[in-house]
Amino acid sequence: MKQAGVYVHFPYCPQKCPYCDFAVRVERVIPQESYTRAVLAELRMRAGELAGTRVVSVYFGGGTPSLWEPELLAGVMAALRASLDIEAEPEVTVEANPDAVRGLPGFRAAGVNRISLGAQSFAPAQLVALGRLHGAAQAEAAVGSARAAGFGNVSIDLIHGGPGQTAAMAGADAARAAALGAEHVSGYALTLTGLAVDVPMARAWRAGRLQLPDDEELAEMHASLRAALGAAGLRRYEISNFARPGFESRHNLLYWTGRAYLGLGASACGFDGRVRSANDRDPDRYMERVLAGELPEASREVPDRDMRLRERIFTGLRLVEGLDLAALEDELDQPVRSRFAPQIERLVADGLALVDGPRLRLTERGLDLHSEAAVRFF
């Protein structure tokens, strides 16, 4: 049976970080019950989108979903199990900020078994520059709280490329995350272009009020991060993701391998294998529409065969193990290897890729230049 995932978006946050373009709403009083009713109503309308699949991952993202009342999140999990074919022990993740870690025993009782902690950095100056509310000690305490609540799978998010950061600082952040025993670490470069909304840091950067590291410095930071994590036993399995053996993110792997996923909540995206949709970003409009019995979509498209092929190549090449081109030919009924033979030969000649039987994978240098390598197929 084909595997699938569920993404549930909780848009509420204590504050909005200056680099964040996610659909986030800062509310003094979060409409917990109304939002939960809306998510459950949307589930009733959309459950059929995953017919014929088995759900292996549920991801509560945000926003700050650790602010969701545990009993309400538990109700969402119960409804998902009643409505979908979910395997006995799926990966169930809740994102949390170090300053908003609460209710962990309740989440664990609801079936959540993975915490994704948005530490971003352990350096005080970087945390201030990124507009974070927590300090390093809170991040460390949050990991301890997760362990005490019974979580054996903790992921830590880091951001490199902030103002004033060096390669040594990026490596120190990674080493500290690993020393906390994180099973998984994501190390993302600060990105201020191509965003969904124009964020404050992007405006300051364009106006010259904010100085950021250049591309060469970013590459050095990522190399330092990789070295620190590799020395601690976390293997790079995707461009920006590292894990101890067996702790790779099952949910993100669904995205990178072109599987179906159901999106619930404001701004959530979904793909049923044929149709791609995205919900209204505004939480109030989302709730109003869905509680009136209307699908709360902002966009809906059916990618053609060529678009699907290029998307699968783009996402598949993000993985260190690369892409099985023979399996892709069977999946999409297209002659991938013969069609793109010149591009593949050039990537190999340039030292950006290797061919291993039917599998095409990028070299370490190719992974660092992923966009440049993948765009050759477009």
Image (spheres, rainbow, N blue to C red):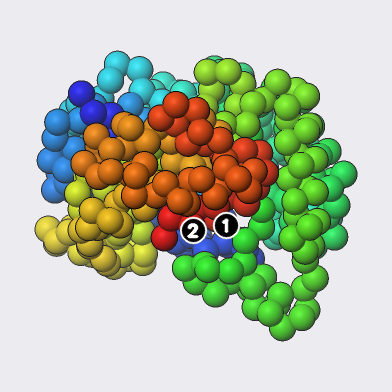
Vertical position of residue 166 compared to residue 163: above or below: above
> Would you say 60 lies left or right of 21 here?
left
Q: In which quadrant of the rendered image does the N terminus lie?
A: top left
Picture coordinates of residue 23, whole percent (x, y): 44, 61
Within-10-Å neighbours for mark 1: few <14, some 14–19, many 20+ = few
- Residue 106 visible? The answer is no
Q: From the viewer's perspective, is 81 left or right of 111?
A: left
Rounded to the nearest angstrom, the CA distance separating label 2 from label 1 is 6 Å
Q: Residue 372's quadrant in the figure?
A: bottom right
Q: Are marks 2 and 1 in contact (CB under 8 Å)?
A: yes
- In the image, residue 206 lies at what x, y percent? 68, 79
Q: Nearer the viewer, residue 286 or 37?
A: 286
Q: Residue at x 66, y 53 (%)?
A: 189
Residue at horizontal 35%, vertical 17%? 89
Q: Amino acid at mark 2?
A: Val
Residue 375, numbered circle? 2
Whether residue 320 can be seen here: yes
Q: Is label 2 in a helix, a strand or a loop?
A: helix
The residue closer to the viewer here, 40 or 56, is 56
Total tally of numbered discs in the picture: 2
Give how far across and how far down residue 142 sits, in percent.
Answer: 66, 33
| Residue 77, picture quadrant | top left
Residue drawn at point x = 45 percent, y = 51 percent: 342
Residue 347 is situated, as x and y percent measured from the top left of the image, at: 56, 47
What amino acid does circle 1 point to? Answer: Glu
Q: Residue furthest bottom?
A: 207
State the quadrant of the C terminus.
Answer: bottom left
Disc 1 on helix, strand or loop?
helix
The residue that mark 1 highlights is 372
